[in-house]
Amino acid sequence: MAQTKGEKKTRPERSGNPAKRAAAERARMEESRAAANRVSRVPRKVKEKGSPRWYAPVMVTLLVVGLLWVVVTYLFKGTYPLPYFVENHASDWLVNGNLYVGFAIMLVGFLGLLRWK
């Protein structure tokens, strides 16, 4: 858009007059403050970003159950909680199956706690 001879486009922020420049800066700051203060006062439900409430107790329970499984296995020399491993695998590596099961339960609980938020 071209200017005619009688029109003069004024831009106070580019003015050589320091008073006009300061007034333009104050007006711009007031406008940005007003925009920042326009906040919705309508309450909104905040979405939970963390884990569900039941998650941590379940993982701690898995850790405790796994520990109890290993303790019972040691106390009863591998025959309990599952006698299957001692009866059917007395000569191979599965004789310690109860220990593997107990440590697997604890591992699931530990890995679950790593993902807890």
Image (tube, helix red, strand yellow):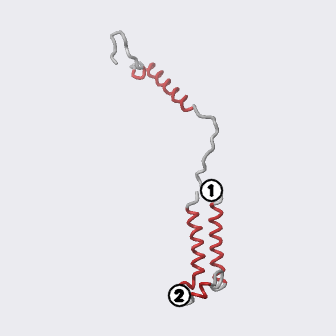
- The kind of residue tagged 1 is Pro
How packed mark 2 is, by other alpha carbons closer than 10 Å (few <14, some 14-19, many 20 or more), is few
Q: Position of residue 12 (x, y in %)?
A: 42, 20
Q: Is residue 26 above or below residue 39?
A: above
Q: Which residue is mark 2?
A: 92
**Mark before the other along the chain sequence, 1 or 2:** 1
Crowd class of label 1 (few under 14; some 14 to 19; many from 20; radius 10 Å): few
Can you identify the residue that label 1 sits on? 52
Front residue (pair 74, 55): 55
Disc 1 is placed on an element classified as: loop
Residue 100 in percent (x, y) is at 57, 78
Residue depicted at x 34% and y 18% = 1
Q: Position of residue 39 (x, y in %)?
A: 59, 34
In terms of secondary structure, where does tag 2 sit? loop
13 or 94: nearer the viewer: 94
**Residue 68 versus residue 110 in the image, above or below:** below
Left or right of 8 on screen, residue 35:
right
Q: Position of residue 67 (x, y in %)?
A: 63, 74
| Image-quadrant location for residue 54 | bottom right
Q: Name the disc covering residue 40, or none.
A: none
- Determine the image quadrant of residue 19: top left
**Residue at the spot 59% in from the left edge and 84% down from the top edge:** 85
Name the residue furthest bottom.
91
Q: Amino acid at mark 2?
A: Asp
